[in-house]
């Protein structure tokens, strides 16, 4: 069994790789040491070991270090294992069982949401959403809750012109100004809603799932017939969604909000 002295080295290695990943290009070892407040000798040793293992690339002419090809394998393994999906699925299942409504988890992909988890409640009508289906983020509750968590500049970059606003039912924001109004309301309310903007006669409530750095990872939503749920019912569903989103976020290492 490894001794406790191994833990600081493991932590320093993780911090070093995360730091390199956050840089726009290769950086000097001295810069890494200063940024992480680590001894230069320790940083050089870690970089040497990581370079031997392929996780770091040394550019001798530039005297700089960047990520190595082995990190690409980690990225594809992350995708294969789909940790967000695996961690979220049982929580979504419990949410659907408790509410009797269809639940789903979707991540933001450009101006669309990509559905990762789709849990149908018994006896409920089919939906246009399903695993691997994409829908316009600005129209869906799951997309809005993620967009509301992003910096304004990132939202502006995603919707540079009115042509970026696709339409399904004739409802929903069609300009950046209108979208900003919707997102402000999401932040004020604490969760996102949509009613008839994706499919006539159906509404959704959603809240954001975040990781340990409070970054928006996905949107968790319930969808139901608009006529079946009044304002009080929708508020209760939203509270249940928010609790479930917080539970998934905790599984991803997020601190309680």
Image (tube, rainbow, N blue to C red):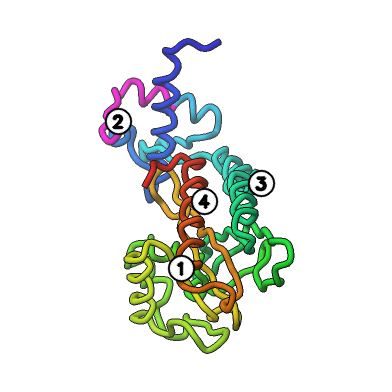
Q: Residues within 10 Å of mark 4 (few under 14, many from 20)?
A: many
Residue depicted at 30% across the width and 26% down the height:
38
Q: CA distance from mark 4 to mark 3?
A: 24 Å
Which of the two marks, 1 or 3, is nearer to us in this view?
1
| Residue marked by disc 4 | 244
The disc at residue 232 is 1
Q: Residues within 10 Å of mark 3 (few under 14, many from 20)?
A: few
Comparing 41 with 201, the one in front is 201
| Residue marked by disc 2 | 33
- Apparent side of residue 47 relative to residue 140 in the rendered image (left or right): left
Q: CA distance from mark 1 to mark 3?
A: 40 Å
Q: Earlier in the sequence, mark 4 or mark 2?
A: 2
Q: Indicate whether residue 41 is drawn in magenta.
A: yes
**Residue 238 point in image, percent of width and height:** 47, 62
- Apparent side of residue 219 relative to residue 119 in the rendered image (left or right): left
Q: Are marks 1 and 4 in contact (CB under 8 Å)?
A: no
Which of the two marks, 4 or 2, is nearer to us in this view?
4
Element under disc 3: helix
| Residue marked by disc 3 | 80
Q: Are marks 4 and 2 in contact (CB under 8 Å)?
A: no
29 shown above or below 6: below
**Residue 194 point in image, percent of width and height:** 49, 74
Element under disc 1: helix
Residue depicted at 35% across the width and 21% down the height:
42
């Amino acid at each position: 069994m490894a001794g406790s002295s191994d833990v600081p080295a493991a932590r320093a290695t993780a911090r070093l790789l995360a730091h390199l990943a956050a840089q726009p290009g290769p950086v000097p070892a001295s810069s890494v040491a200063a940024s992480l407040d680590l001894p230069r000798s320790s940083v050089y040793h870690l970089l040497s070991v990581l370079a031997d293992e392929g996780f770091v690339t040394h550019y001798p002419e530039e005297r700089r270090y960047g990520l190595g090809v082995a990190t690409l394998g980690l990225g594809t393994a992350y995708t294969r294992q789909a940790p967000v999906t695996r961690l979220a699925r049982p929580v979504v299942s419990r949410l659907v069982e408790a509410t009797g409504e269809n639940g789903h988890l979707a991540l933001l992909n450009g101006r669309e949401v990509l559905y990762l988890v789709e849990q149908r409640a018994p006896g409920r009508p089919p939906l246009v959403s399903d695993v691997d289906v994409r829908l316009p983020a600005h129209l869906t509750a799951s997309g809005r809750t993620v967009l509301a968590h992003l910096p304004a500049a990132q939202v502006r970059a995603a919707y540079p012109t009115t042509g970026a606003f696709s339409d399904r039912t004739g409802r929903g924001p069609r300009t950046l100004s209108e979208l900003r109004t919707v997102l402000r309301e999401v932040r004020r309310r604490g969760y996102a809603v949509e009613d008839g903007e994706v499919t006539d006669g159906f509404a959704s409530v959603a809240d954001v799932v975040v990781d340990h750095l409070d970054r928006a990872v996905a949107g968790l939503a319930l969808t139901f017939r608009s006529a079946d749920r009044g304002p009080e019912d929708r508020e209760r569903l939203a509270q249940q969604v928010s609790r479930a989103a917080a539970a998934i976020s905790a599984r991803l290492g997020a601190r309680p909000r």
